[in-house]
Amino acid sequence: MSEGWSTRTPTALLVLADGTVIEGDGLGATGKALGEVCFNTSLTGYQEILTDPSYARQIVTFTFPHIGNVGANEEDLEDLVPENGVGAVGAIFRAEVSAPSNYRSTGPLDAWLKARGIVALSGIDTRALTALIREKGMPNAVIAHSPDGRFDVEALRRRAAGWSGLEGLDLAKDAASARTEIWEEGTWAWDAGYGRPSDHRYTVVAIDYGAKRNILRLMSGHGARVVIVPPTASAEEVLSHAPDGIFLSNGPGDPAATGQYAVPVIRELATTGIPMFGICLGHQLLALALGGTTQKMHQGHHGANHPVKDFTTGKVEIVSMNHGFAVAADSLPASVEETHVSLFDGTNCGLRVKDAPVFSVQHHPEASPGPQDSHYLFQRFFDMIDAHRAKRAA
């Protein structure tokens, strides 16, 4: 499956669990990384993608051929705890990474990948790899980079074949903050950077399973003082902050595994009457807490061009997605209503509890990267908070 464009010795390999070997040119960190290979169809935002904690233990194939031409900076990051090093472990590009050309760039992508410890390769037919994933599903693989081109291919094959994959893995504890902290950064503005809102009209407790920064920025921009608590926080700890709203964050791994400790807490919080909003893994964990089930997807949803229908408005939105597990819609109890659905494959993308201010979505309304069609969901959350406040005051 090598492209065959160059007679140079390959300095990087992608070795799939079935024994397929794909040769390329190495960049980023040297060494090897084990993970599940997926593809992402976004045209922009490669730093946000690679630093999204939801990509833990995954190798991202970019279908857009030109990656890296705007360089890298320290603003376009999404992980809350960079020192954890949780995000994509590998990256695959079609074209050779060119020199950066963008006023926000502080350095080339190659150097940034090295600093992040991300193993990468370029110069392969990413269309063929994407077609393979679509046909056979997301394979386990090892991506390896060695500048001298020397690899123990058989050892790489054995390592890829011997990994059990993402099913059954709880990765939220690795991705999330281990301490309680206050989020203070607001949304980004041209020539001003990220704001620091001081008008805190609400308190939102965000349970961090591997949260993205832009979700918290948007809540801060709505006037929220966001208190971040670890994924293992108890219901008592969450309620001790007197929240006006509770947020369940995105994150990596198998929701059923994380649910072993998260679901009982969410189930208890969902009965308090306090408005609750979940995104991605938070959506899946909420579904489990309400009595639903989740399942591993064939190729997952990864990109910024996914059409989703909101049944509550009748509108179709183009959204950003990143998930390899999905809620089984037919498993949801009668007390729960499906609110969103993927128009690509009909999988569930949202739910709400019929008699409580509790809802969630599978996609990423904060975008980063991606379109902003679903930003209204944050306003929906704060409208619920206002209604709950008014009810309590009556």
Image (cartoon, rainbow, N blue to C red):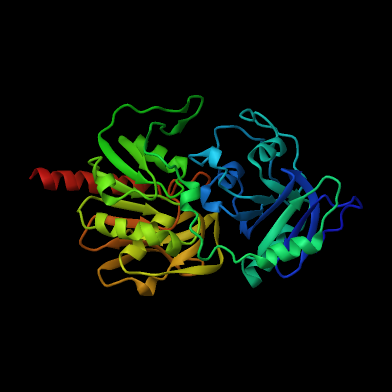
Report whether residue 166 is seen: yes
Report whether residue 371 is seen: no
Q: Is residue 254 left or right of residue 313?
A: right
Which residue is drawn at the image coordinates 19% and 47% (left, top)?
A: 387
**Which residue is at the front of the view, 299 or 182?**
182
Which residue is drawn at the image coordinates 87% and 58% (left, top)?
A: 4
Which residue is drawn at the image coordinates 64% and 55% (left, top)?
A: 59
Quarter of the image with the N terminus in it: bottom right
Q: Position of residue 244 (x, y in %)?
A: 24, 43
Q: Is residue 305 left or right of residue 187?
A: right
Quarter of the image with the C terminus in it: top left
Q: Is residue 237 left or right of residue 21?
A: left
Query: Please, which residue is most extreme toward the bottom here?
Result: 330
Q: Position of residue 188 (x, y in %)?
A: 46, 32
Which residue is drawn at the image coordinates 26% and 72% (left, top)?
A: 334
Q: Position of residue 48 (x, y in %)?
A: 56, 43
Query: Please, which residue is most extreme toward the top here?
Result: 192
Query: Please, which residue is most extreme toward the right here?
Result: 7
Q: Position of residue 99 (x, y in %)?
A: 75, 35
